[in-house]
Amino acid sequence: MADTPSSLQSESLPGRPPYPPFTHETATIKVKAAQDLWNTRDPQKVKNGYTLDSIWRNRDKFFTGHDAIVDFLTDKWRVENGYRLRKELFAFTDNKIAVQFWYEYHDSSGQWYRAYGLEDWTFDPNGLMRKRQMSANDVKISEEERWFKDGVDVNSVEISEKHW
């Protein structure tokens, strides 16, 4: 394999198993590991799943690298209070995974929202994500409509087909 900026930079970072090429089982493990990492809401931990020069598109924002990831997530979780996330495997190939996700949060006024979205991930050989693209829509919900209330395991929530 030719050395690319991502492969050179990820050599200095610890690998994140499972590694590509993915199987259904290993892609599912990767998805749930990302879900758990994001649910920490700790940008310093989350950045470690990505190459130093990871390329991101998150809705209308485009940026690259660990510092930008930390800045973005810090700002995101400053606004998205009570953030709880669920990710499910949508599709996969050798070094790519597509994810469907839902997350809930409330704004500073207490209004709850549920985001519905898809992500497209590309991994380097060490299992670090070198590219992440995300698209989502936010829907206002009431407290009663929430799925991911405190104390609820996000993986145990039954999500009906109309929400897939």
Image (cartoon, rainbow, N blue to C red):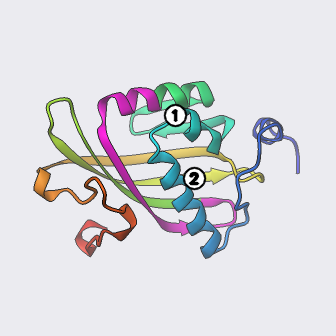
Question: Who's the residue at 54% across and 31% down the image?
Answer: 69
Q: Quadrant of residue 106?
A: top left
Q: Secondary structure at mark 1?
A: helix
In the rendered image, residue 95 lying in the magenta stretch gets the answer yes
Left or right: residue 67 compared with residue 53 = left
* Image height of 4 relative to 85, above or below: above
In the rendered image, residue 5 lying in the magenta stretch gets the answer no
How far from the left and from the top, in percent, is residue 153?
36, 63
* Magenta-tinted stretch: 73-96
Left or right: residue 145 compared with residue 50 = left
Residue at the disc numbered 2: 121
* Image height of 163 relative to 83, above or below: below
Q: Quadrant of residue 21?
A: bottom right
Give whichever of 40, 101 is nearer the camera: 40
Q: Amino acid at mark 2?
A: Trp
Mark identifier at residue 76? none
Question: Who's the residue at 35% across and 70% down the image?
Answer: 156
Left or right: residue 99 compared with residue 14 = left
Q: CA distance from mark 2 to mark 1?
A: 18 Å
How far from the left and from the top, in percent, is residue 125?
77, 53
Furthest residue to the front? 151
Q: Earlier in the sequence, mark 2 or mark 1?
A: 1
